Amino acid sequence: MERYRDGDAVAFERLYARHKGPLYRYLLRQCHPREAAADVFQEVWSRVIASRDRYEVRAAFKTFLYRIAHHCVADHYRLRDRKRENRMDSVDDHEEALAVQGYEQPEARVSQAQLDDAVRLALSELPEEQRNAFLLFEEGGLGLKEIAEVTGVPAETVKSRLRFALAKLRRALADDLGMRVTLQPARMET
């Protein structure tokens, strides 16, 4: 980011290439529908570009990026809630929920779709703080200290949120799918 700040456009391309996948997956889990995640994704990178001239190294770039993403997600939901107050929900808002699955899909695709739905539902039922910590950890690849910096809470609080989130996800998936689920993050060090 320092090289980009100093005028090296290739440095930005490298940052984007390295972080676009995990960032987009994090946003997909946070924002619904998919188009909202894409919009927030663009907003995050726009803010990174806008902050170019005043960027100072205070933490890892990944922490800087996810802090921006965290704020963009919050802004997205604030704006969405304001819009909903001013109008009634339309059918388009529920398009994904109303979509009918095809009858001729292979069994493996159906099973994967059921698993995806169960995970999505289990994640949506987590308290926001736990879901955010889990997604920053799993999708963003951030460590406890980085998540603490992004969310503004102590690392021990992040660790606690992750443990509660994992326990709730295990229970929910075991209940929904009738199987034992092993979600064990390997890197929960402080």
Image (cartoon, rainbow, N blue to C red):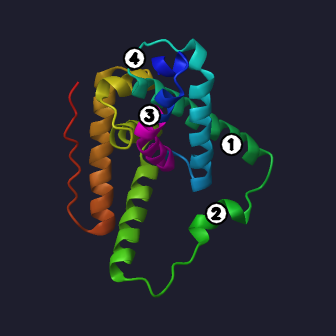
Q: Earlier in the sequence, mark 3 or mark 2?
A: 3
Magenta stretch: dominant secondary structure: helix
Q: How far apart are marks 3 and 4 (CA)?
A: 18 Å
| Quarter of the rendering containing residue 155 | top left
Q: Looking at the picture, tell me which residue is in the foreground, 136 or 18.
A: 18
Mark 4: secondary structure = loop
**Magenta-drawn segment:** 14-29
> Could you tell me how far apart the alpha carbons at marks 2 and 1 are, in whole angstroms?
15 Å
Q: Between disc 2 and disc 1, whose residue precedes?
A: 1
Which of marks 4 and 3 precedes in the sequence? Answer: 3
The amino acid type found where label 2 is placed reads: His
- Residue 94 image label: 2
Residue lying farthest bottom?
104
Can you give x and y, in whole percent of width and height, for residue 166 in the image? 28, 45
Tell me: residue 116, above or below residue 57: below
Residue designated by label 3: 14
- For residue 54: magenta? no
Residue type highlighted by circle 3 = Arg
- Quarter where residue 49 is shown: top right
Image coordinates of residue 5 in percent, x first then y, are 53, 18
Decide: is 112 above or below 23: below
State which mark lies toward you, 4 or 1.
4
Residue at 50% x, 44% y: name it: 27
Q: Distance between the residues labelled 2 and 4?
A: 39 Å
Where in the figure is residue 114, as x and y percent of width and height? 39, 70
Q: Is residue 33 visible?
A: no
- Disc 1 marks which residue? 81
Residue assigned mark 4 = 59
User: Crowdedness of circle 4 by 10 Å Cα count: few (<14), some, many (20+)?
Assistant: few
Categorize mark 1 by other alpha carbons within 10 Å: few (<14), some (14-19), many (20+): few
Q: Is residue 25 left or right of residue 87?
A: left
User: Does the stretch in magenta take in 20?
Assistant: yes
